[in-house]
Amino acid sequence: MRPPGGSLLARLTPPAIAPIWRKVAPCVLAGALAGFLARDLGLIDIASAWVPAALVGAAFFPDRLRPWLGGGLGALLLLWVAAAFTPLPDRLADGLVRRDVVEKADAVVVLASRLQLDGEPTATAQSRLLHALELLAEGWAPNLIVTELGVPAPSHAALARSLLARLRVDAEVQSVGPVRRTRDEALAVAALCRERGWRRVLLVTSPLHSRRAAASLAHEGLDVLSSPATETLFDLERLDRPRERLAAFGEALHERVGLWYYERRGWTALPPGGMGSTR
């Protein structure tokens, strides 16, 4: 039996709230959609980005602010369409991959990427380490340098030593860190190389990161030869699928911004011999 005077919800809700909610609800939905788009574009690295984005959207419910929310959402949607269905990611990635002719070096340097908490490699970490082991097994260098992210991240050095033993590759493993960014890695690797008297290194990282990483190491006085690992997240040579285009767009945009920032801070330099071959 329904209570007199209408439903319980209607009786408990002040009449003034209903008009406000009709304004807030579309803003919440617009903010959530913006969060999904930003995550797909790699602008936000949070799995549930739509939750904080929805809360931000709710703050735009006043009439004077709603056009700004609509304009921002429209711009994000256009960018998402361009990244997913046009050659924009290809254009953004052009010139970011540095691939040099491999020569004898003092050490192979593998830059850190995320490991699983149990120490198992992610796809990116495994691709980098396996390519480094290829170079070591082929005799291009006798030493391996890995960079560490620090606690609570597992040890890259432990994983590298395990892979070396299982694949029966003989090499000395050195680790430096903890590091948070490429600049930290360049400084730490260069310090170790000066201590050991090493001059030339073979750099292994992801393809789109290779130009900035090589220039960062070269700035610290090292002779750098870049040999990128295989890209496991997308087909960089084709980019014929929307999902892969979106992934490549986010990575390429991150590197473009990072390269611009590093150049402005004076943290990059051309190594002897120039930039090598680029995509």
Image (cartoon, rainbow, N blue to C red):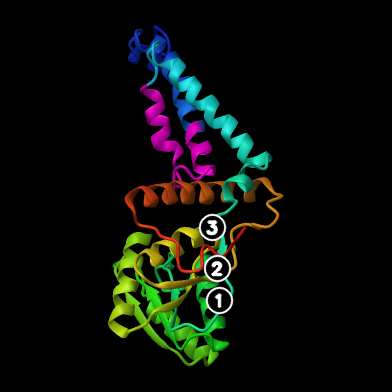
Residue 149 seen in the figure: no
Whether residue 48 appears in magenta in the rendering, the answer is: yes
Q: CA distance from mark 3 to mark 1?
A: 16 Å
Q: Is residue 102 visible?
A: yes
Write the residue at 41% across / 60% down. Answer: 269
Q: Are marks 2 and 1 in contact (CB under 8 Å)?
A: yes
Residue hosting label 2: 228
Q: Which residue type carries mark 1?
A: His
Quarter of the image for residue 183 reads bottom left
Label at residue 66: none
Q: Position of residue 149 (x, y in %)?
A: 34, 66
Magenta residues, start to end: 34-59
Please name the residue that numbered disc 1 is placed on.
131
How packed is label 2: few (under 14 Cα within 10 Å), some, or many (20 or more)? many
Crowd tier of the residue under label 1, counting other residues whose Cα lies within 10 Å: few below 14, some 14–19, many 20 or above: some
Sequence-wise, which precedes: disc 3 or disc 1? 1
Instruction: Name the residue beneath numbered marker 3.
Output: 208
Q: Secondary structure at mark 1?
A: helix
Which residue is at 52% across, 62% downward? 275
> Residue 1, percent across and down?
45, 16
Residue drawn where x is 43% and y is 64% of the image: 114
Residue placed most toward the observer, 211 or 68: 211
Q: Quadrant of the C terminus?
A: bottom right
